[in-house]
Amino acid sequence: QGRLVESGGGSVRAGGSLKLSCTASQNIFRNCGMGWFRQAPGKERELVSIFRNDGSPMYGENVKGRFTISRDNTKNMVFLQMNNLKTDDSAVYYCRADRCSGSFAGFSVWGQGTQVTVSS
């Protein structure tokens, strides 16, 4: 009921592309804000991209112009298309649901994470 499942991570050369997917339960997808975060070794977890409450996307400064967040409302899925990857993009990427409303108010959950490794 309260799970997020990510997929699509892997290894790629700098300049390459990867697409991450996150599948949520219908209740979470409909009642919560969705987004992506990442954490590199020795660094704090940082925002990559989220959908604002009005549905518009927001991006971290380090990924603007290279990453695109999207969603498929029929499949309860959120995607992160990552282009022109850099070695600094290497991290574990997490799907996140928070800012939940209605009966899910106060609820939040992280996915298990998917590793992205970018080599030079």
Image (cartoon, rainbow, N blue to C red):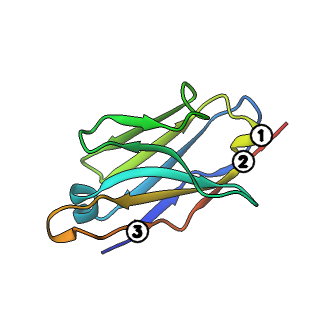
Find the residue positioned furthest to the top: 65
The mark nearer the N terminus, 3 or 2, is 2
Q: Rate crowding at label 1 as few (under 14), some (14 to 19) or many (20 or more) other CA atoms within 10 Å.
A: some
Q: Amino acid at mark 2?
A: Ser
Q: Mark 3 = which residue?
A: 109
Q: Rate crowding at label 2 as few (under 14), some (14 to 19) or many (20 or more) other CA atoms within 10 Å.
A: many
| Residue 57 sits in quarter | top left
Name the one closer to the observer, 32 or 84. Answer: 32
Q: Position of residue 96 (x, y in %)?
A: 43, 59
> In this view of the protein, can residue 116 be seen by the observer?
no
Secondary structure state at the residue bearing disc 2 = loop
Q: Mark 2 = which residue?
A: 90
Q: Is residue 74 left or right of residue 113?
A: left
Find the residue positioned furthest to the bottom: 1
Q: Is residue 30 left or right of residue 15?
A: left
Whether 49 is drawn above or below 83: the answer is below
Find the residue positioned furthest to the right: 120
Q: Amino acid at mark 3?
A: Val
Q: Position of residue 20 (x, y in %)?
A: 53, 47
Q: Are marks 2 and 1 in contact (CB under 8 Å)?
A: yes
Secondary structure state at the residue bearing disc 3 = strand
Q: Amino acid at mark 1?
A: Thr
Q: Position of residue 39 (x, y in %)?
A: 64, 56
Q: Is residue 18 left or right of residue 4?
A: right
